[in-house]
Amino acid sequence: MHASKPSVSPLLWVPTGYFMMALGYVMLTTVTAIMFKNLGMDNGKAAQYSSLLILAYTVKPLFAPFVEMYRTKKFFVLCAQVLIGLGFIGIALVMALPNYMAILMALFWALSFVGATLDIASDGVYVTSLDSRAQSLYCGIQSLSWNVGPIVAAGGMVYLSGWLHVNVFHHDAAVFGPDWIESWRIIFFLVAGLTLVLALWHARFMPDGARAENTPSSVKAAGHILMDSFVTLFQKRGIWRMIAFAFLFRLSIGFLEKIGPFFMVDPVAKGGLGLNNEMLGLIYGTYGLAAVLLGSLLGGLYVAKRGLRETLFVLCCAVNIPNVTFLIMAVYLPTSLSLITAGVMIEKFFFGFGAVGFMIYLMQQLAPGKYTTTHYAFGTGIMGLCGMVTGAISGHLQEWMGYITYFIFVMVATIPSFIATWFAPFYIDEAAGEDPENSRAVPA
């Protein structure tokens, strides 16, 4: 693959491109859960419906080769962004209809596949428009820009929904139900407008992206490449332990991810903390995500200094043990916003610190070989599958158990993560980047 020479500075499209990727993903898979909760859904349905939207992002490696075949990568980026913008407008309009939920879910489901296509095409523009030196130079900006998306969506938009609900529409923030529709319609109109503006921006400044050397020329060729990538994946040494690691490393986080925000906004009578959307957006979506960013930065430096083999179990501890902060809050139900913020930031900081180990492990141990990008995507897809399955059942389990027992269950769910991490294989030398015993014998 030869990187094309971009005619404009990557600073004009890399930050906005990755911000848009994250904004769409978080709106569809995280913010929807909070919206469903506000609209009066019980925890079981709210978590289940939003978690099922992760499916498209989980299976995107299956249709990535087909996206690469037609037109330019920029064409798919622009089409996806326009469709997402129009789709969010459609969602805002549909919410004004009676019995809107079935149509709403169909729109969300369709948009999740459009969002997954946007991810594929945006990554393709980045990889093929920049050479390896430029990719290294802009990777920090790429990562930072992606992480701004959740702060805007799960922080700013959730905060704004609560502010509109109370200060513009004059409703009670503690009462969930149809009164929240007006606020969330405005949120989706705003995000739609931002998305369409970014599409116009990228039409002007984003390069087309080069064609990869192994891009399939037909559907049959794409199917052959996809099949070969799966065959070579399962020929890797220790692949089943790697798959177990990919699925189980963040198992407890999967059970916590949807329920954490519900715990924040549920009334004290139901075992929650009774916060409003404004405080949820500020504490969970802003301070919490800032803590994730800081933890990720320090975790990356820690691994770079000590090496992954030596640090992986420590990183697993960092991801799992601090989940106990939610159990402590469920037991004592603190009313101090400072204590609640501290609890969330502690959990999020250590999650960010430890989660880098998962990504680096996939890069260094699972991905290397003939189909590096596809195998890395397979690993992240397994992680996404875990998040989808655990998220889909998490709300039902919480309703059955109550918050205190559920958070005890979350701590028990850390045990498979520790076991999978302890037995995670290291066959590829971290420095050399290849398996000395297997790199020649098995194409991967």
Image (cartoon, helix red, strand yellow):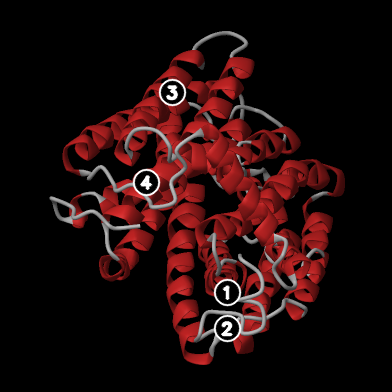
Q: Nearer the viewer, mark 3 or mark 2?
A: 2
113 sits left or right of 4 in the view: right
Q: Residues within 10 Å of mark 3 (few under 14, many from 20)?
A: many
Say which residue appears at 65% left-offset and 47% top-offset.
227
CA distance for labels 4 and 2: 29 Å
Number of numbered markers: 4
CA distance for labels 3 and 2: 42 Å
Residue type at mark 2 is Leu
Which numbered disc, 3 or 4, marks the residue that appears first in the sequence? 3
Q: Can you identify the residue that label 2 sits on?
A: 308
| Secondary element type, mark 4 | helix
Q: Nearer the viewer, mark 1 or mark 4?
A: 4
Q: Quadrant of residue 405?
A: bottom right
| Secondary element type, mark 3 | helix
CA distance for labels 1 and 2: 7 Å
CA distance for labels 1 and 4: 24 Å
On screen, 204 above or below 323? Answer: above
Q: Residues within 10 Å of mark 4 (few under 14, many from 20)?
A: many
Say the numbered circle drawn on residue 122.
Answer: 4
Q: Can you identify the residue that label 1 sits on?
A: 357
Which numbered disc, 1 or 2, marks the residue that appears first in the sequence? 2
| Secondary element type, mark 1 | helix
Residue type at mark 3 is Gly
Q: Judge by depth and name the residue closer to the eye, 188 or 74.
A: 74
Q: Nearer the viewer, mark 3 or mark 4?
A: 4
